[in-house]
Image: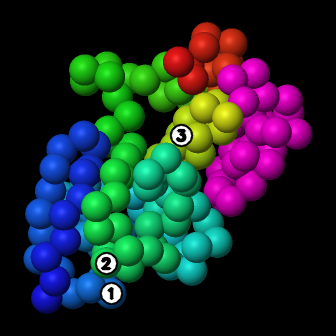
Amino acid sequence: MTTIQLTVNGQSKTIESPPMKRLLDVLREDLHLPGAKEGCGEGECGSCSVLMNGDLVNSCLVPILQAEGAEITTIEGVAINERLHPIQQCFLENGGAQCGICTPGMILATRHLLEKYPQPTLLQIQDGLSGNLCRCTGYIRIFNAVQAAALVGAAE
């Protein structure tokens, strides 16, 4: 067991964990944050995406030891004072969320994208979300949600 200190959604956390336990499992099992989902377990689907020190990562591929001292943002940390973040609201209004498996990763990928490109082109949106798979929407509604979020200035 190793003692790991990290910040999750703005709160300092200290946990005891095997050093190679996946960040995904620590978030879900130890910190009771079920938003990141187990999809493929191989870093291919994006269902487990979180922001780690501002970068979008697949938490299923990150050993917890690698997260020592990191700042992690999960979907649970996106809402503002218990109100939906504008990105979340745009996904809701545009039908960008259906079954919910990919939605947390898509929203975090959108946040990451809009921080880089506040007014992204369709090609930038497609590239920014390329690591996240959706089997329900066909992506058009998700792209529309991202474009709507850009229009309301969700990057700010």
Which mark is first along the chain, 1 or 3?
1
Total tally of numbered discs in the picture: 3
Query: Which range of residues does the magenta coloring cover?
Result: 117-144
114 in the magenta segment: no
Residue drawn at x 74%, y 34% is 143
| Residue 134 - label | none
Q: Position of residue 139 (x, y in %)?
A: 75, 44
Using the image, determine if residue 6 lies above or below residue 110.
below
Circle 2 residue: 65
Marks 2 and 1, Cα distance to the nearest angstrom?
6 Å
Circle 3 residue: 107
Using the image, determine if residue 139 lies above or below residue 3.
above
Q: Nearer the viewer, mark 2 or mark 1?
A: 2
Residue type at mark 1 is Met
Considering the image in quadrants, where does the N terminus appear? bottom left
Marks 2 and 3, Cα distance to the nearest angstrom?
26 Å
Q: Residues within 10 Å of mark 2 (few under 14, many from 20)?
A: some
139 in the magenta segment: yes
Residue 28: quarter of image: bottom left
Tell me if label 2 and label 1 are in contact, CB under 8 Å.
yes
Circle 1 residue: 20
- Identify the element where label 1 is drawn: loop
